[in-house]
């Protein structure tokens, strides 16, 4: 018995879980310190009764997702402790006791903050110290109980045995399987539809189908898998994942990586700043729309030579900096004159005018989806002055930046 006690003490310390035993009325702490919950007589009685009803460890899960386990060891049973089979300590029978009950726990299946922890201890009548309860995944909890049980009785217990024998764990089995994407058969159809919808959404983006992409995006919200406990965080994480996937699809549809990632970074920052679910969904939808529109424009615009495509990508990547024709020409191994003439011939506009257009596009986006002052936006996209920015902006959009912001800024932002 002493060797078993030593093994249990080491296991308890290693796994950060309490282990106790009780024969008759005496409770012995094998691995501590003793959690004050164990002073609850009703809990001890329920665990003892559960241990006597089954040959495998009994596991009790309470309403707070905190678990306790118990296991009955008949007196006199030989136990394999590694090097030799050890017989139960004869002193255990000195009072005519026929059994010893072992207790394991508490073990949390959820993270317990201060408020939740206080509720747990109040439920068990604990006043005073409220030590933290370690969180276990469902699988780790079963492995822990199985290992400790094996040391106690010498018998091997599989996870399947433990989960099937302990009815109180059924809701948690389902929850853990859902989180791990191991769904029950009656949920597989929903998973199939969600996956199909995701594929359809990404295909719409690759094809530049704006209206269809937005429809699929909205439909998927209904069957969206849970990503966080807090509702707003659930939508935020899901939206970030959606923008990331859509960005890759846009690149596959022909949008330059520099342009796609700039747009992705912008919307992910806005998702991080959004304070409510409505704002998150609005930003997500806007990202889907803008990325798909970029694909559409790319696929329905006259194709250009490799030189011009590389030139455009350079502008997208460096529009916030001072761009010199000589730098682009050097990168492509062309003369400035030839590159300027080639760009105008293929696109119909001068390179310098194209640079201004790209800066205006980004400025217009910032006017709608940021609270930054107009002067700061002009500086950000590298216009030399606010007055020049205002003039060229009005030439393109037929209104001033201020009026554009007031007229088109979404109400939710």
Image: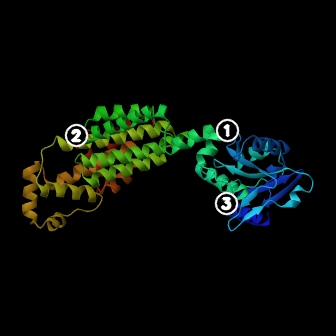
Q: Is residue 68 left or right of residue 189?
A: right
Q: Secondary structure at mark 3?
A: helix
The answer to whether residue 413 is visible is no
Q: Position of residue 101 (x, y in %)?
A: 80, 50
The earlier-in-sequence mark between 1 and 3 is 3
Q: Which of the two residues, 279 or 60, is positioned nearer the viewer here?
A: 60
Q: What residue is shown at x 53% (from left), y 42% (from top)?
A: 177
Say which residue label 2 marks.
296
Say which residue label 3 marks.
15
Q: What residue is shown at x 29% (from left), y 32% (from top)?
A: 211
- Report crowding for label 1: few under 14, some 14 to 19, many 20 or more residues within 10 A (C-alpha): some
Say which residue label 1 marks.
168
The earlier-in-sequence mark between 1 and 2 is 1
Q: Is residue 151 left or right of residue 164?
A: right
| Count of picture labels | 3
The quarter of the image holding the N terminus is bottom right
Q: Is residue 97 left or right of residue 82?
A: right
Coloration mode: rainbow
Q: Secondary structure at mark 2?
A: helix
Q: What residue is shown at x 71% (from left), y 57% (from top)?
A: 17
């Amino acid at each position: 018995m002493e060797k078993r006690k030593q093994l249990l003490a080491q296991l308890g310390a290693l796994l950060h879980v309490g282990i106790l035993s009780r024969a008759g009325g005496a409770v012995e702490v094998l691995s501590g310190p003793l959690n004050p919950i164990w002073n609850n007589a009703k809990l001890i009685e329920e665990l003892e009764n559960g241990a006597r009803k089954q040959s495998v460890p009994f596991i009790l899960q309470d309403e707070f997702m905190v678990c306790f386990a118990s296991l009955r060891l008949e007196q006199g049973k030989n136990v394999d402790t590694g090097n030799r089979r050890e017989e139960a300590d004869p002193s255990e029978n000195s009072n005519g006791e026929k059994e010893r009950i072992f207790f394991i726990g508490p073990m949390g299946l959820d993270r317990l903050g201060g408020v939740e922890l206080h509720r747990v201890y109040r439920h068990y009548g604990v006043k005073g110290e409220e030590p933290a309860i370690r969180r276990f995944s469902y699988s780790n909890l079963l492995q822990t109980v199985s290992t400790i049980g094996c040391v106690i009785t010498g018998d091997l217990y599989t996870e399947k045995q433990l989960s099937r024998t302990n009815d109180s764990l059924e809701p948690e089995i389902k929850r853990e399987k859902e989180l791990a994407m191991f769904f029950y058969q009656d949920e597989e159809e929903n998973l199939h539809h969600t996956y199909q919808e995701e594929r359809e959404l990404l295909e719409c983006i690759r094809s530049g189908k704006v209206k269809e992409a937005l429809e699929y995006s909205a439909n998927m919200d209904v069957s969206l898998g849970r990503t966080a406990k807090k509702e707003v965080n659930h939508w935020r994480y899901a939206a970030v994942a959606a923008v990331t996937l859509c960005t890759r699809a846009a690149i596959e549809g022909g949008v330059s990586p520099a342009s796609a990632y700039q747009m992705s970074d912008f919307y992910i920052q806005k998702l991080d700043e959004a304070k409510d679910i409505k704002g998150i969904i609005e930003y997500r939808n806007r990202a889907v729309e803008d990325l798909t529109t970029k694909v559409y424009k790319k696929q329905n615009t006259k194709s250009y030579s490799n030189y011009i495509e590389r030139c455009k990508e350079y502008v997208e990547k460096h529009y916030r900096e001072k761009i010199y024709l000589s730098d682009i020409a050097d990168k492509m191994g062309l003369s400035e004159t030839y590159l300027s003439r080639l760009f105008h011939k293929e696109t119909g506009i001068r390179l310098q005018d194209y640079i201004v257009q790209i800066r205006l596009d980004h400025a217009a986006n910032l006017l709608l989806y940021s609270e930054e002052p107009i002067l700061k936006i002009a500086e950000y996209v590298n216009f030399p002055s606010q007055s020049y920015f205002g003039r060229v902006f009005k030439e393109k959009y037929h209104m001033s930046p201020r009026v554009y912001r007031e007229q088109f800024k979404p109400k939710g932002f």
